[in-house]
Image: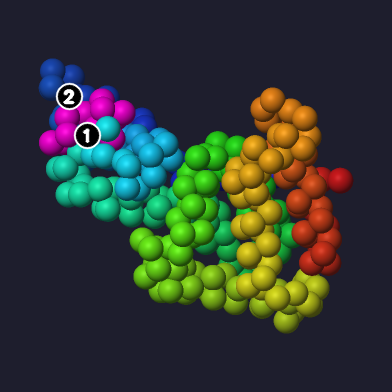
């Protein structure tokens, strides 16, 4: 089963017509610069927190002039919001597409495995989000009460449809989403604890493969479903 962890953007450009200069694509440059700024901000906020982070440091990490950063984001708060939004979109993209006619085992397993892979690829982002929520979600309260609440209700509705049709066991759909979020993000948020307890210096790919297999098996069987792998 091939899993998509995030929406891929094609980077293939059309070859310019013969004798014609290559077209200038400001949209692509803007997107690339914005990605650089958000990636740099992730490291800056992780190291210094929101209060200690500065736009100047973010600009230096992104290797862009400070004026360029301010062109895309008028202040530090907007950069932070953009970073948190990107984290949540990235996490939930694969489960945002599920439909009542989909196979529940395949859909849930794809969600679990994608979330484990994202914990491997973006551990800093996961810890930043956890820190924001632990502090009372000062920058995310409105989003959690509106967009995120609606997303969870909508996705829970699809799971409830599967339950009502007898395609999976009687489970609380919202609690199931919480369980998948927490168990998969645990490998990023509590990396230090896990490595110390397991007496490891760092994670290896097989650690995440095993975690994905284990969580898929336990969660799906708890839902009366069978995972694709033993």
Name the side, left or right, on which 101 lies relative to 207.
left
- Label 1 element class: helix
Front residue (pair 164, 82): 82
> Residue 211: percent from the left, percent from the top?
74, 43
Whole-percent x, y for residue 131 in the image? 49, 52
The image quarter in which residue 33 lies: top left
Residue 13: tell me if it is visible. Answer: no
Quadrant occupied by the N terminus? top right
Circles 1 and 2: CB distance less than 8 Å? no
Q: Which residue is mark 2?
A: 22
Relative height, residue 183 to residue 173 (above, below): above
Q: Nearer the viewer, residue 39 or 193?
A: 193
> Seen in the image, is 211 located left or right of residue 20?
right
**Crowd class of label 1 (few under 14; some 14 to 19; many from 20; radius 10 Å):** some
Give left or right: position of 229 versus 162: right
Q: Sequence order check: which comes first, mark 1 or mark 2?
A: 2
Nearer the camera: disc 1 or disc 2: 1
Residue 214 position within the rendered picture, expressed as x and y whole percent measured from the top left: 80, 47
Magenta highlight range: 58-68
Check disc 2 and report its element: helix, strand or loop: loop
């Amino acid at each position: 089963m091939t899993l998509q962890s995030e929406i891929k953007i094609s980077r293939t450009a059309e070859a310019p017509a013969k004798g014609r200069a290559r077209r200038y694509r400001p949209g692509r440059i803007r997107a690339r610069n914005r990605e650089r700024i958000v990636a740099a901000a992730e490291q800056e906020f992780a190291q210094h927190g929101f209060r200690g982070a500065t736009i100047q440091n973010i600009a230096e990490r992104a290797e862009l002039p400070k004026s360029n950063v301010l062109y895309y984001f008028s202040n530090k708060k907007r950069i932070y919001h953009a970073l948190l939004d990107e984290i949540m979109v990235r996490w939930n993209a694969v489960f945002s597409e599920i439909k009542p006619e989909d196979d529940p085992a395949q859909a849930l397993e794809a969600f679990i495995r994608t979330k484990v892979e994202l914990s491997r690829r973006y551990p800093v982002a996961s810890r930043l989000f956890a820190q924001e929520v632990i502090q009372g979600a000062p920058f995310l309260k409105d989003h959690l009460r509106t967009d995120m609440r609606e997303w969870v209700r909508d996705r829970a509705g699809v799971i409830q449809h599967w339950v009502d049709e007898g395609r999976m066991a009687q489970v609380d759909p919202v609690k199931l989403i919480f369980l998948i979020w927490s168990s998969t993000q645990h490998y990023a948020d509590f990396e230090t604890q896990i490595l110390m307890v397991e007496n490891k210096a760092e994670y290896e790919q097989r650690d995440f493969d095993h975690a994905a297999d284990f969580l898929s098996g336990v969660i799906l069987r708890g839902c009366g479903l069978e995972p694709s792998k033993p």
